[in-house]
């Protein structure tokens, strides 16, 4: 089965729906029409650029090029994590915490999947490595940003309660345990909901793409199950790592909450 090619007119019709949505937002005074149009244009430009890069990578497979693109994707994901937070950890550390958590979880799980589970040879084959890492980073990014945002916001808003616990002799781990657990749950909730709804409510993107490309449905399902397991593990470990790094950074060695490190 050959994939039906899409023309510029086809994409234009789909884009028209977004324009209508933006106009509806304007009429209803929702205030999101500018973001809808801006991010639609940004998404289109980014995907077209990625398409050109991937076409070059597929025809010139190189481990160094794949690693370079992976690092660029990681850097962009780290920026998005920090940008989505209402209250942020000040300075370079705020960026590095989220980026490090995603690197530890997504890269290690992607490498495990490529070398042990799928057994791609060579492991840096772009057709497998780039899409797999992209899916892991995208989902881990959402979980990490949600968890850090909730942790930092809750520590700032409930700092009086936390500081009272510290004055009563509790260590920072105990004084912030309930806030950290809630933040972890918040970060893991999207992937938990995705797994609960997969197959019954929605057909995940990778499975749909493979089926449209002619892959037998059962084989597409097996790959989707694998991806969902990897994403769940990557998101979970990424969230746990991010919360651990953030909390450790916001408390000093004398178990004092450092509110000056949180943006107002």
Image (spheres, rainbow, N blue to C red):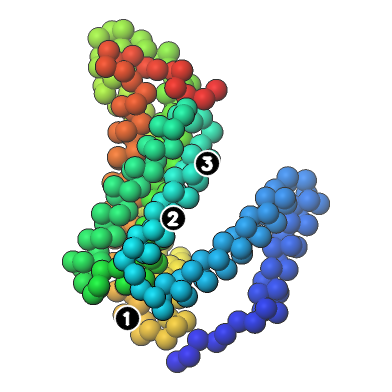
Picture quarter containing residue 178?
Answer: top left
The disc at residue 54 is none
Counting from the top left corner in percent of width and height, residue 190 is at: 42, 51
Foreground label between 2 and 3: 2
Q: Cβ–Cβ below 8 Å for labels 1 and 3? A: no
Foreground label between 1 and 2: 2
User: Which quadrant is home to the N terminus?
Assistant: bottom left
Q: Is residue 225 above or below residue 148?
A: below
Dot 3: element: loop
Q: Residue furthest right?
A: 27
User: Which quadrant is home to the C terminus?
Assistant: top right
Q: Residue at x 46, y 71 (%)?
A: 54
Q: CA distance from mark 1 to mark 3?
A: 37 Å
Counting from the top left corner in percent of width and height, residue 105 is at: 29, 49
The disc at residue 84 is 3
On screen, residue 252 versus residue 214, left or right, reads left
Which mark is first along the chain, 2 or 1? 2
Picture quarter containing residue 100?
Answer: top left
Q: Residue at x 73, y 46 (%)?
A: 30
């Amino acid at each position: 089965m050959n994939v039906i090619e899409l023309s510029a007119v086809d994409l234009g019709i789909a884009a028209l729906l977004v324009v209508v949505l933006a106009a509806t937002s304007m009429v209803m005074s929702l205030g999101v029409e500018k973001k809808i149009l801006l991010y639609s244009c940004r998404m289109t430009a980014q995907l077209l650029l990625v398409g050109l890069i991937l076409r070059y990578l597929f025809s010139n497979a190189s481990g160094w090029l794949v690693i370079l693109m992976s690092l660029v994707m990681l850097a962009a994901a780290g920026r998005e994590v920090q940008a989505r937070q209402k209250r942020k950890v000040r300075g370079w550390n705020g960026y590095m915490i989220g980026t490090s958590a995603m690197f530890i979880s997504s890269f290690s799980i992607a490498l495990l999947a490529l070398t042990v589970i799928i057994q791609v040879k060579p492991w840096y084959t772009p057709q497998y490595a780039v899409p797999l890492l992209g899916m892991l980073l995208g989902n881990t990014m959402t979980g990490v940003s949600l968890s850090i945002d909730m942790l930092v916001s809750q520590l700032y808003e409930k700092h009086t309660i936390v500081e009272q616990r510290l004055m009563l002799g509790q260590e920072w781990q105990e004084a912030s345990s309930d806030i950290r657990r809630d933040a972890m749950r918040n970060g893991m909730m999207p992937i938990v909901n995705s797994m609960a709804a997969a197959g019954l409510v929605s057909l995940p993107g990778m499975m749909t793409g493979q089926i449209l490309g002619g892959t037998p449905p059962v084989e597409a399902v097996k790959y989707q199950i694998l991806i969902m397991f990897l994403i769940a593990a990557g998101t979970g470990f990424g969230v746990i790592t991010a919360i651990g790094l953030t909390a450790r950074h916001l408390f000093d060695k004398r178990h004092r909450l450092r509110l000056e490190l949180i943006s107002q």
